[in-house]
Amino acid sequence: KNEVEQSPQNLTAQEGEFITINCSYSVGISALHWLQQHPGGGIVSLFMLSSGKKKHGRLIATINIQEKHSSLHITASHPRDSAVYICAVRSMNYGGSQGNLIFGKGTKLSVKP
Amino acid sequence: DVKVTQSSRYLVKRTGEKVFLECVQDMDHENMFWYRQDPGLGLRLIYFSYDVKMKEKGDIPEGYSVSREKKERFSLILESASTNQTSMYLCASTAGRPSNQPQHFGDGTRLSIL
């Protein structure tokens, strides 16, 4: 069983739609990250969360520590949001002092004009 | 802004060759990481380093070694390349011990072993 599960694996949306990507994890964590990977490979860190909610522009990330669940929301989606979104957690027991992460397999988002 | 630079975006090598992938970061980060990314498997940690001349095995170290002679540079070495090492390789760095900072990634090297 994977320690970090994302859903859905693939998501196609129309421009303007509200999008939700989910992440569930099974280990104790000190932080959860949402990452974005565009075609071509480079990965950018969007959010790092340990509790509550963070917002940046049209992106919102929430985390529920008790339920071991996080969501990434995109409001008013746009074709430039098309990318792979990756959830990663910093486990308390897995190299946490060095910042090691455990990654989900990613959600591929395609936003059509 | 933190810059993590990988020496090549695309690389083609032959089976049995010794392959070097280089990564340099410019923000004096203590921790550096090498991952490989394969379809359906996500990112998997090969090796990491938390200080100069220090290295630790990740989840899939077999067939790889690393070198960290200077703080800013972390090299991944494929001692004798094989076709199953064809993959996207990503380097990352982060600051602090314990580290509670985001990881900063390079643009990746797409390596093909023929």
Image (cartoon, coloured by chain):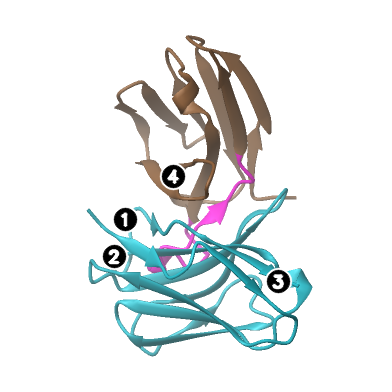
Chain colours: A brown, B cyan
Give the numbered dot on residue B101: 1
Residue at mark 2: B95
Vertical relation: B6 (above or below) A45: below
Vertical relation: B109 (above or below) A34: below
Dot 2 amino acid type: Ala
Front tag of 2 and 3: 3
Dot 1 amino acid type: Gln
Vertical relation: B106 (above or below) A113: below
Q: Are marks 4 and 3 in contact (CB under 8 Å)?
A: no
Residue at mark 4: A33
Spot occupied by residue A55 in the image (x, y as percentages of width and height): 32, 26
Sequence order check, earlier mark of 1 and 2: 2
Q: Which residues are magenta?
A: A91-106
Spot occupied by residue A40 in the image (x, y as percentages of width and height): 52, 47
Residue A49 in sight from this viewpoint = no
Q: Are marks 1 and 2 in contact (CB under 8 Å)?
A: yes
Give the numbered dot on residue B85: 3
- CA gap between label 1 and label 2 equals 6 Å
Dot 3 amino acid type: Gln
Dot 4 amino acid type: His
Marks 2 and 3 belong to one chain? yes
Chain letter of disc 2 in the image: B
Residue B45 sits in quarter = bottom right
Marks 4 and 1 belong to one chain? no
Chain letter of disc 1 in the image: B
Mark 4 packing: few (<14 Cα in 10 Å), some, or many (20+)? many
Does residue A101 belong to the magenta stretch?
yes
- CA gap between label 3 and label 1 equals 30 Å
